[in-house]
Amino acid sequence: MEPVPLNENDAARQRLTALIGALGDEGLRKPVEPGWSVATILAELAFWDRWALTLVRRWRSGHLPPPTVPNWYDDAINTTLRPTWQALPGPVAAQLACAAAEEADLEIRKAETPVVAGILAAGQGNLLHRHVPRNAAMDRIEAA
């Protein structure tokens, strides 16, 4: 079984906190790509970290999520929630992103070996590898 990437998650969370601290209100409003500002990306990141937190918590309590979802499912969620994310003030999106990352990492840290094994066996390693979407989001922001 692969190890849970606790150090990588911590490093990505620390990078996120530092990036947000350097942005300021104007930086949070900066457009990144059509329909996506820095704040919108942070709100999206907050949602997916909370999603991972919720599902890991459910796995830990014995309430397993459905075994499969269609390939288009994540895109449908993003499309549905983007107007809400766009409406959030930048500082709120930034606070949500930091809080969600911290809470997700804490829940992942508590995941017992059988839970981790079950998550990985179900092909849901993305729930544990929170550093991947965090770093991708920050790379998008920094490239802008």
Image (tube, rainbow, N blue to C red):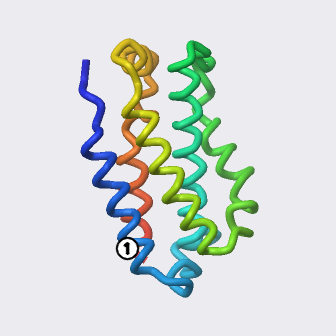
Q: Is residue 136 left or right of residue 34?
A: left
The quadrant of the image that shows the N terminus is: top left
From the viewer's perspective, is 90 left or right of 79? left
Image coordinates for residue 85, horizontal then vertical, percent: 68, 62
- Decide: is 75 above or below 20: above
Q: Give the residue pinned by disc 1.
A: 143
Question: Residue placed at 74% from the left, 50% from the top?
Answer: 80
- Residue drawn at (40%, 65%) of the image: 17
Along the line of sight, the residue nearer the viewer: 37 or 49: 49
Residue 18: x and y, percent? 36, 70
Q: Foreground: 58 or 142?
A: 58
* Residue 51 screen position, x and y as percent: 58, 39
Q: Quadrant of the C terminus?
A: bottom left
Circle 1 sits in a helix, a strand or a loop, which is it? helix
Q: Quadrant of residue 15?
A: bottom left
| Residue kind at label 1, given as amino acid type | Ala
Residue drawn at (56%, 64%) of the image: 95
